[in-house]
Image (spheres, rainbow, N blue to C red):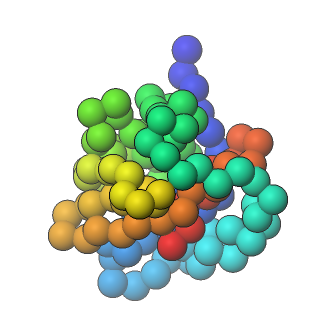
Amino acid sequence: MKRTLSALAIAAMVAACSSTPSPETQTASASAAAVATGTVITNDSDFRDVVIEKELVNSALTVRFTPGNELIGQRANGEAINGTWLWEEGLFCRTIGEDRNCQVIRVSGNTISFIS
């Protein structure tokens, strides 16, 4: 059975890999305020409970986080997304290529937001 989560702001997580912000990134950033009433995840254990081995999907990309701290996915244009992730001082930190970014994670219902 395939498990998925709707991810309004997941585009913000990988947007820093491109030099020009995509329209999805701008929408995702604006949408972060819409889920401000959700629960902030501040540790590895809670993050794993919410997202490990689930597909996070929006119009810009699909991504999955593995138990081995890998981030694997694909952009809507077919470009592969490969990286790593970890928790550092209460923040989710991910590295894709040369880019490293730490973010606040907020969950509200079936929506998870990655907020830079």
Q: Is residue 17 visible?
A: yes
22 in relation to 37, above or below: below
- Which of the two residues, 25 or 45, is positioned nearer the viewer here? 45
Q: Which residue extends farthest left? A: 98
Which of the image's four quarters has the N terminus? Answer: top right
The location of residue 50, given as percent across then percent down, is 57, 35
Q: Which residue extends farthest front? A: 89
40 in relation to 25, above or below: above
Q: Is residue 80 visible?
A: no
Write down the quadrant of residue 104 in the picture.
bottom right
Q: Name the residue rendered at 44%, 42% in the picture.
A: 44
Q: Is residue 79 left or right of residue 39?
A: left
The location of residue 91, given as percent across then percent down, is 46, 60
Q: Which residue extends farthest bottom? A: 20
- Which of the two residues, 50 or 11, is positioned nearer the viewer here? 50
Q: Name the residue rendered at 58%, 50% in the picture.
A: 41
Write down the quadrant of residue 105 in the picture.
bottom right
Q: Name the residue rendered at 28%, 42% in the picture.
A: 70
42 in relation to 110, above or below: below
Q: Is residue 44 left or right of residue 10?
A: left
Q: Is residue 27 left or right of residue 33?
A: left
The location of residue 114, given as percent across then percent down, is 54, 61
Q: How many marks are shown on the rendered structure? A: 0
Q: Name the residue rendered at 71%, 41% in the picture.
A: 110
